[in-house]
Image: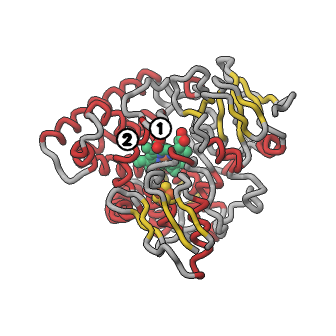
Amino acid sequence: MRITADNERCIGAGQCVLTAPDVFDQDDDGLVTVLAPEPGAGLTDAVWRAGDLCPARAITVHED
Amino acid sequence: MTHADPMVVDFPLRKPGEAFPPPRYTTYREQEGLVLSYLPNGNKCWLVTRHEDVRAVFTNPKISSNPDHKGFPNISETMGVPKQEQIPGWFVGMDSPEHDRFRKALIPEFTVRRVRAMRPAIEETVDKLIDELLASGNSADLVADFALPVPSLVISALLGVPPVDRDFFESRTRTLVAIRSSTDQQRDTATKELLRYINRLIDIKSKWPQDDLVSRLLATGTIAPHELSGVLLLLLIAGHETTANNIALGVMTLLQNPQWIGDDRVVEETLRFHSVADIVSLRVAVEDVEIAGQLVRAGEGVIPLVAAANHDEKVFACPHAFDPSRTDRHHVAFGYGMHQCLGQNLVRVEMEIAYRKLFERIPTLRLAVPVEELAFKHDVVLFGLHEMPVQWESS
Ligand code: HEM
Ligand code: SF4
């Protein structure tokens, strides 16, 4: 699993940080940064949920 | 495709004396397409009730938040709120890209990390209010004496209002939401006084910048001072009654379900369960667009009913049960899409601290009247409680 996040779309709602704090963070501008682009299997569930919760559809989960 | 005979329902949607969300919402969700309503001014308006469709409305670029568009469903006139002039900086009523300039400038002020740093100050505010409650006897109106001052004091601190002015600030914001006990004219005066105060604050911060939100926003240079006053008023109004209603309703629900007292998951479930901002997000189609198989024409109003979406049985198991142990957090109590509530993480912390401190420090807290006698807000935009008489044992 690989994760990308689109800084341009992000509206800083922080849902991703609340849901998967080991994978996402907010930078100084409050926008999403990916801490763990290839998170371990234990985080799969949280990552999918973060992707669904993101109100700006800024998070993409690639299943390769 | 379009449905020949959509169900047509009356506006306003809430009726005194019935449960909220109205049980009729279940029937609305079962309709094919959308439900049609006519506003008091005769304007046509579509109601969107299923979770999936509500999210689709919030993210559709053909659907606008700008009240200047013809056909915008301006319900506030009939629900106790004065008509909102297009105030500069009122970015909740703007579309991309105008909206984004304001939102981007404000995001850093509301990150999860920034809000966590405000925690000790919020705890202190809540503790002080509880001290005052306890000192005043053994009964109170939990709305006026606790639920409303918490967000008002938190926002005034956030805006950098000096402590000596916070009583002034709090009393004026309280007048704004006291629909029952204040006149239109008093509310109008209070708004003007607040705007004047905000303008003075901006003036002071531009001359003597400090390490606070207003000074930082001025320093970015992306928001002009005359726009900033609208931005600050929006923060104040958007974050006051919404939060207060959630605090009061949450306490009421905890008193009815005491097994959940002390569990922080109550915060998220209160937001979903009560969905106080049901008819807050108003929209208008600016091009013909299809929603749930229903053709919506340009110039027709669209209201995503978040309380209906948050009780959609396809998405939430037993939606009408208050169950903080749910693991799904994808309610739309804060909206969805680019306008999703900017203050959401601040609110979560405020609610958590308010519930925890209140029940820790006043464990004998109880309602002073039966739940059925509480004055629920059926007559204004936001759902909540006008008053909430409570009492406790003196220690
Ligand atoms: C429980 C309390 C709250 C609820 C239920 C709530 C609900 C909402 C909803 C539904 C929206 C979306 C409006 C739309 O789509 O048209 C919104 C937007 C907004 N809220 Fe909140 N809100 C709450 C508290 C706060 C607080 C405490 C603040 C700030 C201090 C705040 C600031 C804002 C702002 C600035 C917007 C506009 C965001 C934008 O247009 O990008 N809210 N809120
Ligand atoms: S949830 Fe989406 S919009 Fe919010 S901070 Fe994360 S990426 Fe940005």
The amino acid type, in three-letter code, at marker 1 is Ser
**Number of residues whose C-alpha sits closer than 10 Å to that of mark 2, classed few (under 14), some (14–19) or many (20 or more):** some
Front residue of B140/B303: it is: B303
Front residue of B387/A33: it is: A33
On residue B96, which mark appears? Answer: 1
On residue B145, which mark appears? Answer: none
**Number of residues whose C-alpha sits closer than 10 Å to that of mark 1, classed few (under 14), some (14–19) or many (20 or more):** few
Q: Residues under labels 1 and 2: Cα distance?
A: 9 Å
Pointer 2 residue? B101
Q: Is residue B293 left or right of residue B92?
A: right
- Is B271 located above or below residue A24 in the figure? above
Residue B358 in percent (x, y) is at 47, 63
Q: Is residue B240 visible?
A: no
The amino acid type, in three-letter code, at marker 2 is Arg
Proximity of marks 1 and 2: CB atoms separated by less than 8 Å: no
Outermost residue on the left side: it is B208
